[in-house]
Amino acid sequence: MRVIITEHAKKRLKDFRQDGISIDDIIDSARKIPGHIPTATRFRGFLCKSGRIFDIVAKDIPAGRLVITIIGVRVKLL
């Protein structure tokens, strides 16, 4: 499946909360989402190679799977 990442999502990768998340992590995670996504939906709990947890907002369009944004999850230390 083709994965299309919006400019907004690419821009967010530069933010501190998304530090350590790569384009390859996003593509791998988006491809692992099963089924068809007719409306923009948030998928939680993906793990990137650097160990950071992140969420993806994605939607299926005729050209492929559109990744709208990335949300880095803050991990609370005990």
Image (tube, rainbow, N blue to C red):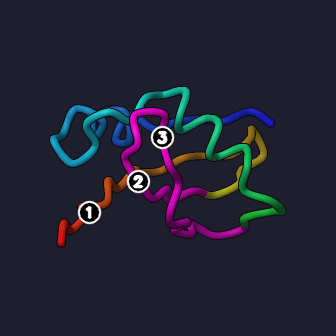
Q: Position of residue 3 (x, y in %)?
A: 66, 36
Q: Amino acid at mark 1?
A: Val
**First in sequence: mark 3 vs mark 2:** 3
Quickly name the residue at label 2. Answer: 53
Query: Toward the viewer: 31 or 78?
Result: 78
Quickly name the residue at label 3. Answer: 48
3 over 41 or under it: above or below: above
SS under mark 1: loop
Residue 19 lies in quadrant? top left
Write down the region rendered in magenta. 38-58
Farthest front residue?
78
Few, some or many residues within 10 Å of mark 1 (<14, 14–19, 20+): few
Query: Toward the viewer: 51 or 45?
Result: 51
Q: Amino acid at mark 2?
A: Ile
The answer to whether the residues at label 3 and label 2 have Cβ atoms under 8 Å apart is yes
74 relative to 69 in the view: left or right: left
SS under mark 3: loop
SS under mark 2: strand
Few, some or many residues within 10 Å of mark 3 (<14, 14–19, 20+): some
Quickly name the residue at label 1. Answer: 75
> Residue at left 60%, top 46%?
66
State how far apart marks 1 and 2 are (Cα).
8 Å
> Residue at left 65%, top 37%?
28
Q: Is residue 45 magenta?
A: yes
